[in-house]
Image: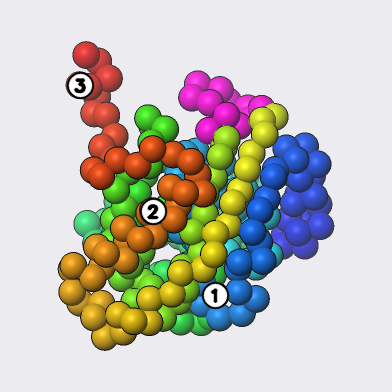
Amino acid sequence: MQSFIRYVLAPLVRLLWRPRVHGTGHIPSSGPVILAANHRAVADTVFIPLVAPRRVAFLGKAEYFTRRGLRGRLSAGFLGALGYIPVDRGNARAGLAALAAGREVLRAGGVFGIYPEGTRSLDGRLHRGHTGVASLALSTGAVVVPVGLIGTERVRPSGRRLPRLARVEVHFGAPLEFSRYEGLEGAPTIRRAVTDEIMDAIADLSGQVYVDSYHRRPSESDRAA
C-alpha cells in the first residue's frame, strides 16, 4: 500500500490538483519533527503527507480502522500507509492518549503532524492554538515546522460528496526550535509562549487573520437559530 501511495497516488494528486508546494527543504531530513498546520478541511491530512519529503504520522479516529468488510480493510490499510495512528477520541482521556501517541512517534525520530487549533476553522480565520503542540516540542526536543495550507477547503466544500479540482498551496516554514526552554515544559506560561510563536508563524504562511480565542464549533441550537 505504501508503494501504491508513493508511486501512484502521490503523482496522481500532483498531476490533477497541481499543488503549489514551497519550503520542503525546511523539513529536516532526519530526527524528530512536528509539522504544525492550520486546519481548513479534511483534505489537509491528505495533502500534507503526499507532498512532504518524509513519512508523516497523523492521528485518526479509531473507528476508521475497525470497519468490517473489504471496504473497511482497504480503508484501514490506506490510512495506515498514509501514517494515520488510530486513537479513540470518544474516550475521556483522548487528549492524553493523543499526546502520548505523538511523543512515541517523535521519540522514535519520526515526523508528527498536528493542528494546534484542535478542529477545522469554519470561518476561515486562524484561531488560538492549544498548548499540546508546545508540550510535545518541549518534552521531546523536536523542532517545529509551521505549515500554511491555502485552498484546501475548496477541494471538497460542505455538502459536496466528491472532491473537485481546486488550486491548493502548501507552505512549509523555517523550523522553530525551543531548546532555550529546556526543563520548563511544566510551566503553563512557557507552553503558551511557545504555542503563540508557532501560531504567529502559521498565520504568516497561511495569510489568515488571527483570532486570539479558541475555535468553537456551532452547536445544534446555533445551527437551528
Q: In this view, does 201 lie to the left or right of 169?
A: left
Q: How crowded is mark 1: few (under 14 residues within 10 Å), some or many (20 or more)?
A: many
Residue at x-position 57% and y-position 29%: 154
CB contact under 8 Å: marks 1 and 2 = no
User: Picture coordinates of residue 98 (x, y %)?
Assistant: 36, 63
User: Picture coordinates of residue 172 (x, y %)?
Assistant: 58, 57
Specify the label residue 71 is tagged with.
Answer: none
Instruction: Write down the quadrant of residue 136 in the picture.
Output: bottom left
Q: Is residue 67 magenta?
A: no
Q: How crowded is mark 2: few (under 14 residues within 10 Å), some or many (20 or more)?
A: some
Q: Is residue 159 left or right of residue 187?
A: right
Per the image, the residue denoted by label 3 is 221
Which residue range is magenta in the image? 153-164
Residue 143 higher or lower than 171, as above or below? below
Q: Can residue 8 be seen in this view?
A: yes
Instruction: Write down the quadrant of residue 181 in the picture.
Output: bottom left
Q: Which amino acid does label 3 sit on?
A: Ser
Per the image, the residue denoted by label 1 is 110
Q: Is residue 158 magenta?
A: yes
At mark 1, the secondary structure is loop
Q: Counting residues from the N terminus, which is met first, the one under dot 2 or under dot 3? A: 2
Marks 3/1: CA distance?
A: 42 Å
Q: Is residue 214 visible?
A: no
User: Picture coordinates of residue 206 (x, y %)?
Assistant: 50, 44
Residue 159 higher or lower than 117, as above or below? above
Specify the label residue 200 is tagged with.
Answer: 2
